[in-house]
Image (cartoon, helix red, strand yellow):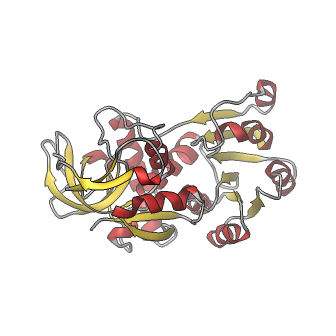
Amino acid sequence: MHAITISEPGGPEALVWGEVPDPVAGEGEVLVEVVASAVNRADIMQRQGFYNPPPGASPYPGLECSGRITEIGPGVSGWSVGDEVCALLAGGGYAEKVAVPAGQLLPVPAGLDLKQAAALPEVVCTVWSNVFMVAHLRPTETLLVHGGSSGIGTMAIQLAKAVGAKVAVTAGTKEKLDYCAELGADILINYREQDFVAEIERATDGAGADVILDNMGAKYLDRNVQALAVNGRLAIIGMQGGIKAELNIAALLGKRAAISATSLRARPLGEKAAIVAAVREHVWPLIEGGRIRPVVDRELPMSEAGTAHQVLEDSGHIGKVLLVAP
């Protein structure tokens, strides 16, 4: 088969489409013929040499895919050859075939085509696990999403609105904020021109955000704590703004607030399977009912993964960028 390999850490040119050995479906796994994958910031970090796959995972980038099952490994039940699926991966999505633990498979939701489904697993599992399973966002509460026009952001807006929450977003252009508003965002903050702490305080009559979904890490830590409501919850899922920052413990204590930090890739199989099962139970009906949809900015051939990475690095997109297999 062919896959995107990384000859050595570097820029987008480090991604090379070449011939590699076929994967094998092991115990508890199925083999999926990939139709499409999607690009995530974690893939860029892997290309740069900062985020290696966990032990035993495929060395190729790609944390989600969609496709058709071509082989059932030992110990797998409930799935059949020919089933159309999408999957959460620890790696290997940028390839023509990938071996997937059965607990990380999802059926393609009714109403979506197979390529569109590739835009779902990573963002839906990330948002559901962090905003709902960890931070316990409730109806009528306020969620602040940094990077509201990203793949994660566009999904977080829709899911939060579906459960009856109020949503604030940050983004860097009017076009991106307008799109967030179309998805249901209530409070629109241009981070290039406005202070999100002041805007959240103004929009909530001084109460603050009950939950913040943060992709920036160190750069926003102090201001995120300032923006939290009493009993607020800060969920950190990225470090685009650095990895080290000082934390004002007194401010955190004063708000009786909580900070969580998670990633999906290195979690044990059982934890991933539990998240995937929760997503299938709670989110798939919303997608099939037309209340939630993946936002796809563009599709590119998988062999042009370097171009797709450059689009993400330039922030020249809204939603997800898909890579389509030959």
Residue 200: percent from the left, percent from the top? 80, 52
Viewer-proximal residue among 303 and 88: 303
Viewer-proximal residue among 163 and 160: 160
* 76 is higher (above) or lower (below) than 114: above
* 110 is higher (above) or lower (below) than 310: below
Residue 224: percent from the left, percent from the top? 74, 41
The answer to whether residue 94 is seen in the rendering is no
| Residue in the picture at 48% in, 73% down | 290
In the image, 228: left or right of 116?
right
* 245 is higher (above) or lower (below) than 279: above
In this view, the residue farthest toward the top is: 249
Q: Quadrant of the N terminus?
A: bottom left
| Residue in the picture at 34% in, 57% down | 65
Residue 187: percent from the left, percent from the top? 76, 62
Residue 178: percent from the left, percent from the top? 69, 72
| Residue in the picture at 87% in, 55% down | 202
* 274 is higher (above) or lower (below) than 268: below
In the image, 90: left or right of 151?
left
In the image, 5: left or right of 139?
left
| Residue in the picture at 61% in, 57% down | 160
